[in-house]
Amino acid sequence: MLHTVNKSPFERNSLESCLRFASPNDAILLYEDGIYAALKGTKFETTMTGALQQFKIYVLAADLEARGLKTDRIIAGIQPTDYGGFVDLVVEYSPVQAWL
């Protein structure tokens, strides 16, 4: 299953809920304000590093760039992807669960 998170973990608990209910080997895509969970040096870095042991985690590069951030700011192991990659993830990990 592909889990998508588009809300900032600093404002909502969408990411927390996602991590609680996701199954091992699921994939998680962070986009829009959800990308803040992928950044090094935040209070979520330890959580995300641990989550990488169970899940493949992706971040939409265009949303990083839209916020003035570069891919060198993301936690090691989180993979940047583009819109085509987003589509590929939807196909590969169907169904999709959106965490709002």
Image: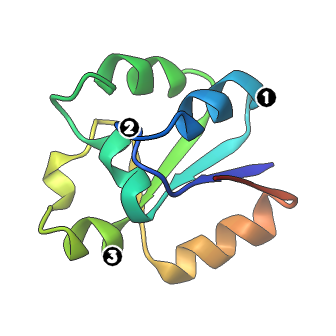
Q: Earlier in the sequence, mark 1 or mark 2?
A: 1
For label 1, the SS is loop
In the image, what residue occupies the spot 52% across and 24% down?
Answer: 51
For label 3, the residue is: 62
Quadrant of res 66? bottom left
Three-letter amino acid code at the position of disc 3: Ala
Q: Is residue 93 above or below residue 10?
A: below
Binning the other alpha carbons within 10 Å of mark 3 as few (below 14), some (14 to 19) or many (20 upward) gives some
Residue 62: where, in percent of width, then height?
33, 76
Q: Amino acid at mark 1?
A: Ser
Q: CA distance from mark 1 to mark 2?
A: 18 Å
Disc nearer the start of the sequence (2/3): 3
Report how far apart the C-alphas of labels 1 and 3 lie in the structure: 27 Å
The residue positioned 31% from the left and 47% from the top of the image is 36
Does 52 appear above or below 87? Answer: above
Q: Give how far across and how far down residue 23 sits, in percent.
A: 79, 28
Residue located farthest toward the right when viewing the structure as drawn: 95
Q: Is residue 96 above or below residue 8?
A: below
Residue that numbered label 2 is attached to: 77
Residue position marked by numbered label 1 in the rendering: 23
10 Å crowding of disc 2: few (<14), some (14-19), many (20+): some
